[in-house]
Amino acid sequence: MARSKQKFKDTGIELKIEAVLKSMRLKYVKQYRINGLLDVDFYLPARNLVIECDGNYYHANITTHPRGRTGARRRAKDYARTQTMLSMGYSVLRIWEHEINGSTHAKLKRKIASVI
């Protein structure tokens, strides 16, 4: 498995999703590098699934972030990343910070289970 060589510090939302993945006994790779191009938060090789944990501010959530040019660019970049992964045959699940923080462990488990 190609793990990213870049050092990443896990965010709180990534730690929550990791706890859910562990409780589901799913095998995953954190900070997985796809074809030397994209670093993703989690990759589940058995399902060819990418899980991205999107922070509301950084990823410019339209409900929590102003619609300025920076936000539009960030959303466009995320959309392009998702389309690239889909075109490479990966399934992609993006989960917003407010969804992770506002959901119970069981609800997050159901959300992940719905795509595997």
Image (tube, rainbow, N blue to C red):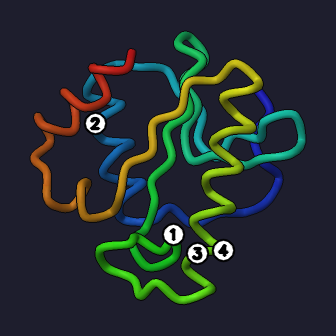
Q: Amino acid at mark 3?
A: Ala
Between the C-alphas of marks 1 and 3, the distance is 9 Å
Q: Amino acid at mark 4?
A: Arg
Residue 5 to residue 45: above or below: below
Q: Secondary structure at mark 1?
A: loop
Q: Residue at x 66, y 28 (%)?
A: 86
Residue 49 to residue 3: above or below: above
Between discs 2 and 3, the one toward the N terminus:
2
Relative depth, front residue between 69 and 43: 69
Q: Quadrant of the N terminus?
A: top right
Q: Position of residue 75 (x, y in %)?
A: 57, 65
Relative depth, front residue between 46 and 8: 46
Q: Amino acid at mark 2?
A: Val
Q: Are marks 1 and 4 in contact (CB under 8 Å)?
A: no
Q: Are marks 4 and 3 in contact (CB under 8 Å)?
A: yes
Residue holding disc 4: 73
Q: Secondary structure at mark 3?
A: helix
Q: Amino acid at mark 1?
A: His
